[in-house]
Image (spheres, rainbow, N blue to C red):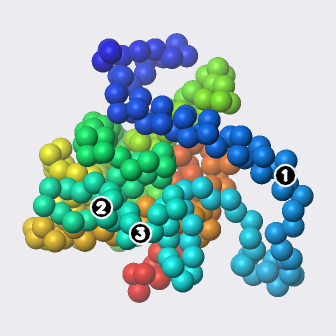
Amino acid sequence: MHQAFRLHGRQRRAFSAVVDTLKSKIQGLADKKAPQLTALRKEHGNKVLGETTVGQCIGGMRGITCLVSETSLLDPMEGIRYRGRTLQECMDQLPKAPGSKIGLPEASFWLLLTDEMPSDAEVKALNEELHKRSTLPQSVVTMIDSLPKETHPMTQLSMGLLALQPTSEFGKAYRSGNLKKTDYWVYTLEDALSLVAKVPVLAARIFRNVFMEGKHIPSDPSLDWAGNYAQMLGVSDDALFKDVTRLYLMLHADHEAGNVSAHTTHLVGSALSDPYYAYAAGVCGLAGPLHGPANQE
């Protein structure tokens, strides 16, 4: 079961039980949702959602209802729901790190993908898988370490994501000419898992280069995804800093695709650009002063 296998004539990643489980759950959810989507198109395809004014168009589609979001819903009064659950419900139900009361963001990732609360064992296996995928290619490390400290961290992050793009499973499979449309999501998921695994290592390296004189803290495979990120940042040894990091990342796990960065990622991905291209574009959107830096300021 654990030997490497081949697909489209090239070596693929070794079998992973947790990724296989994740794919099975996603496929099952898709099989369940597909008839609902077909019925929605058939029964309500011509229904008018509202009027659009010239002012809304000039204002960049502000206030126009034009998105379908399965994973999350953003209400201006209630806040965000993940798969129909309030953030408080998610906090109560999501698995947690030992000694912590904060729902793990990697568990919310599982919830968003599958519409199911993962078990403690599933989150443990997912964390192990993410650690296995987390190593940055030396070429990416060399590139990031060569950048001037004055280069904005968001610029460095987008550059790092693009430098990882040659590792894209989707890109390689699509260029092979043998990829079926029904399998797009499988390779997209592979890239998404690898990105989720590598981004904390990449972001922590950028932070330590810019603010800590390039003195790096190694990844600890015994820690959860967000706790490990907090440790690599090295801002504080207090366990509460790990919990704050877990909380912050859990609260930002999804945003309905209506804001600049999420919408940009979806838009770029709709061109069949692989997740590395799409995520890098989203980061560039997030870097705008009316988006991410608004929190910073």
Residue beneath disc 2 = 103
Residue 146 can be seen, yes or no: no
Residue sitting nearer the eye, 279 or 41: 41
Residue at the far right in the pictured view: 46
Residue beneath disc 3 = 87
Q: Position of residue 101 (x, y in %)?
A: 21, 66
Whichever of callouts 3 and 1 sits on the residue coming sooner in the sequence is 1
Q: Quarter holding the C terminus?
A: bottom left
> Dot 2, crowdedness within 10 Å: few (<14), some or many (≥20)?
many
Distance from the alpha carbon under mark 2 to that under mark 1: 39 Å
Residue beneath disc 1 = 43
Q: Between label 2 and label 1, give the one nearer the viewer.
A: 1
Q: Between label 3 and label 1, give the one nearer the viewer.
A: 1
User: Which residue type does callout 1 highlight?
Assistant: Glu
Q: Quarter holding the N terminus?
A: top left
User: Which residue type does callout 3 highlight?
Assistant: Leu
Q: Position of residue 61 (x, y in %)?
A: 75, 74
Residue sitting nearer the eye, 23 or 276: 23
Distance from the alpha carbon under mark 3 to that under mark 1: 32 Å
Q: Position of residue 120 (x, y in %)?
A: 26, 46
- Quarter of the image for residue 148 reads bottom left
Whichever of callouts 2 and 1 sits on the residue coming sooner in the sequence is 1
Q: Left or right: 204 with respect to 62?
A: left
